[in-house]
Image (tube, rainbow, N blue to C red):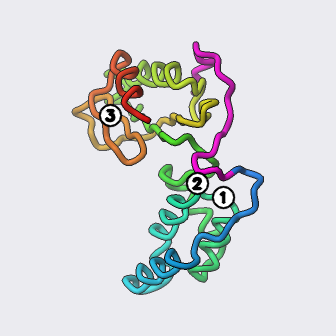
């Protein structure tokens, strides 16, 4: 689905939140204290592969997204193939396959929320963030908006997630206030 250019008309870029760009070489994450933390996590699992999801979280926390270099680092750390890691990364929307805005906004547009106006919430978010379209990042690097399937809050349409925070009962009118409370 496309929502067309935003009213704000800002330039659309895939801006990284933590200073990491698409074309920059991958800097290893699992070194020093982070390697110690990964080893501590690995000790809790029966196999290294079983720790794939938390390892990817650690990588994304450090770099803001999961690059090809990051996938290779995780694969090496867990003794699995990069193809297996990529399959997992591409399955879950919670892992970013490209740089995203500092505030990553997920909007439920599954049918129950859709009939309650989720599409209008998406349009309002795209307009007021300056993102212009789903999956793009605002020119100031602050926002990326995507649609997701049911967030498990069907009674509180429209729910959105801003990074790890849940916001319920969002309306097109409440979007500017919600965004103004973000740094
Ligand atoms: S359908 Fe939107 S939260 Fe469940």
Residue for point 77% across, 53% down: 23
Q: Residues within 10 Å of mark 3 (few under 14, many from 20)?
A: many
**Image quarter for ligand 1:** top left
The answer to which image quadrant residue 183 occupies is: top left
- Distance in Å between CA atoms under marks 2 and 3: 23 Å
Name the residue carrying label 2. Answer: 65
Name the residue carrying label 1. Answer: 67
Is residue 138 shown left or right of residue 108?
right
Is residue 89 shown left or right of residue 173?
right
Looking at the rendered image, the quarter that the N terminus falls into is top right
Contact check, label 1 and label 2, Cβ < 8 Å: yes
Circle number at residue 159: 3
Mark 3 or 1, closer to the camera: 1
Q: Residues within 10 Å of mark 2 (few under 14, many from 20)?
A: many
Identify the element where label 1 is drawn: loop
Identify the element where label 2 is drawn: loop
In percent of width and height, residue 9 lies at: 64, 16
Residue for point 44% across, 22% down: 119
**Camera-side residue of 79 and 113:** 79
20 lies above or below 40: above
Q: Mark 3 near ligand 1 (CB under 8 Å)?
A: yes
Give the mark nearest the N terminus, 2 or 3: 2
**Numbered range of the magenta stretch:** 1-20
Give the mark nearest the N terminus, 3 or 1: 1
């Amino acid at each position: 689905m496309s929502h067309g250019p935003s009213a704000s008309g800002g330039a659309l870029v895939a801006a990284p939140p933590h200073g990491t760009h698409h074309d920059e070489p991958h800097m290893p994450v699992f070194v020093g204290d982070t390697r110690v933390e990964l080893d501590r996590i690995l000790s809790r699992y029966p196999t290294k592969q079983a720790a794939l999801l938390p390892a990817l979280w650690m990588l994304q926390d450090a770099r803001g997204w999961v690059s090809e270099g990051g996938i290779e680092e995780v694969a090496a750390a867990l003794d699995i193939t990069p193809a297996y890691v990529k399959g997992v990364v591409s399955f879950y929307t919670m892992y970013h396959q490209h740089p995203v805005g500092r505030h990553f906004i997920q909007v439920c547009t599954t049918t129950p929320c859709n009939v309650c106006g989720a599409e209008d919430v998406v349009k309002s978010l795209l307009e007021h963030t300056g993102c212009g379209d789903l999956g793009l990042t605002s020119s100031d690097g602050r926002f990326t908006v995507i649609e997701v399937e049911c967030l498990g809050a069907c009674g509180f349409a429209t729910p959105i997630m801003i990074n790890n925070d849940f916001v319920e009962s969002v309306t097109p009118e409440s979007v500017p206030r919600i965004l103004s409370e973000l740094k």
